[in-house]
Image (tube, helix red, strand yellow):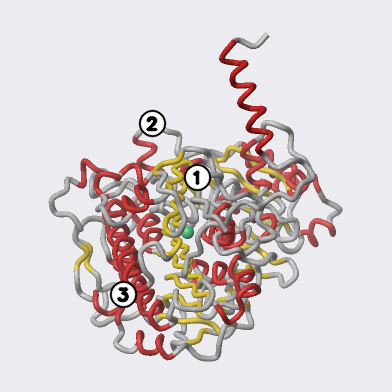
Amino acid sequence: MYSRPGRLCLVLLVVLMAALPRAGSKEQPPPAPAKPKLVVLVVFDQFRGDYPQRWKDLYGEGGFQRLMKEGTWFSNCHYPYGITVTGAGHATLATGCEPYRHGIIENEWYDRETRALVYCAKMPQHRKVGAPPVKEPESKGENKITGYGSPERLLVPTLADAWKDKFADKAKVVSLSLKDRGCVFTGGRKPDACYWFDDKTGAFVTSTYYAGHVAPWVVEFNAPKPADAWFGKDWTRFRSDLDYQKCSGPDDQIGESNVEKLGRVFPHPLTGGLEKPGAKYYTALYTTPFANDLLLQFVKKAIVAEQLGQHEAPDLLCVSFSATDSVGHCWGPDSQEVLDTALRADAVLAEFLRYLDEKVGKGQYLLALSADHGVCPLPEISQQKGLPAVRMQPTELQKRAEEFLQEKFGPMSRGKYILEVSWPMIYLNHRALADRGLASEVEIALVGWLKQQKGILKAYTHHQLAARLPGGDGLGAALQKSFHPERSGDILILLQQYSYCSKYLTGTGHGTPHPYDTHVPLMVFGTGVKAEGQRQDRITPLAVPKILGYAVGVELPHATVEVPSGLFVPVAP
Ligand SMILES: [Zn+2]
């Protein structure tokens, strides 16, 4: 029996259902959101998902706070896959699917066909355009990556590709960043402009994949050498009124790096140790928040020169600010430098929004802001907190793993058991193993050995990841989403939480399925977006291109997630 209020509800439900379209009748499609003139994807590289909340009260009103209040802020957004690096993150934001489908499993991997390490955003046949090549010092024994920027290693189309397919010359696609892998994937296969910062010359460049020469506005921008403006200056704290120690931590912390003579503490001198601007200075600049300021200047120039927001169909602008990443790698997420860079990122964002208001119009553009990955604390800081964090180096691990295999299976007459370690993947020497009649027993033995090493939680064979993993192995399932049978190694290593592996003995990074690496912000703002404020429902950045495409009717066939319900204010057709 229904109670009296229950019966009333039932009556109301029946009335409501009668008002709904009947099954089989012609259903009305849901009303489309209002159309923006310009759609903007903003990525802050390595801007971890807790940074907006952590320093919420320190941000100004026009930047992150504006997006949080006037838009929708998804504070529980995580990448669903295991190898959380820049190439993979940007390719995911570009395609709406995971690395096992879009193919960008890592920044680099070993290509068995060409027997060389390959880089996700370069192809060997392309060359730099827009600045003279600079001869780099020969690195002995290292597998050298050749070529220049290109999205050709992507295995599926991007939002930008679908954009150009739908609108052709009626809309422009522009993708800009400080690093190539920050813009080549989001720009897709046929952008109208795709440029990044060349830290050898300080110029914004492109590659022969896109064009034989840079656009006149890029020549004009590069001519007065705007990157040189910070030469000889110091990077000091953005907010002299703020107690940085209280808001982040001590200035000098064990484990911090010293990149190009920037030093570990404020003020950071910006010369790269040079008398006049050169490659070391540009690398130093790239490791300060001023590189984001430089990119914003370039973005403003692009908005005007490419007349973004003024075409027959909506334009697409993708911008990835990379300095948050280089600073985070150098000093770690709990440093005063990362706090300072976050505050300056907020100012960059505020100025970017103000400029879009002026040039495109308030409410006339749709913007999504996210990051490509988070970051692990400096292992030494975790150790001080009593956490079992280990700092390790891939070359050292490779040496010991090789010794273990030689001891167990006998010395090799030629070559080694391990062909290449492209962290966190190990590629075995298949030919030599076959010569000796060895196969999966080597993988299994190596996995067993790896699991006993400090800092390593688990290791998986190619075979395991290509098949179904036992239920309950969430981290393994995440690694599977970063696994591609032809590109991935024979063994994938999963680090323990707070442990970090890189060729450097200082600094930190990312690349695991642990929450500090997967957690990123996602803020959506502008045309048709509800001013919903913070939403805590779990979401992945795979939704980003889907949201941006939906707003202008661009279909994304490879996207595996839906537009979050209730994000847009419906508009009657
Ligand atoms: Zn990154």
- Viewer-proximal residue, 156 or 554? 554
Residue 352, label in figure: none
Q: Is residue 39 above or below residue 332?
A: below
Are the two marked residues, 3 and 2, in contact with CB atoms closer than 8 angstroms? no
The amino acid on which the numbered mark 2 sits, given as a three-letter code, is: Gly
Q: Position of residue 95 (x, y in %)?
A: 62, 61
Q: Is residue 468 above or below residue 399?
A: above
Most extreme residue toward the right is: 437
Q: Earlier in the sequence, mark 3 or mark 2?
A: 3
Is residue 418 among the parts visible in the rendering? no
1 or 2: mark nearer the eye: 1
Q: CA distance from mark 3 to mark 2?
A: 38 Å
- The quadrant of the image that shows the C terminus is bottom right
- In the displayed structure image, the side of residue 45 where residue 8 appears, left or right: right
Is residue 301 among the parts visible in the rendering? yes
Q: Residue at x 49, y 52 (%)?
A: 373
Disc 2 crowd rating (10 Å Cα; few below 14, some 14-19, many 20+) is few
Q: Which residue is mark 3?
A: 281
Are the two marked residues, 1 and 2, in contact with CB atoms closer than 8 angstroms? no
Q: Position of residue 408 (x, y in %)?
A: 73, 44
The amino acid on which the numbered mark 1 sits, given as a three-letter code, is: Cys
Q: CA distance from mark 1 to mark 2?
A: 28 Å
Q: Which residue is mark 1?
A: 77
Q: CA distance from mark 3 to mark 1?
A: 36 Å
Residue at disc 2, CB closer than 8 Å to ligand 1:
no
- Viewer-proximal residue, 463 or 123? 123
Q: Earlier in the sequence, mark 1 or mark 2?
A: 1
The amino acid on which the numbered mark 3 sits, given as a three-letter code, is: Tyr
- The quadrant of the image that shows the N terminus is top right
Disc 1 crowd rating (10 Å Cα; few below 14, some 14-19, many 20+) is many
Q: Which residue is mark 2?
A: 386
Q: Position of residue 131 (x, y in %)?
A: 44, 87
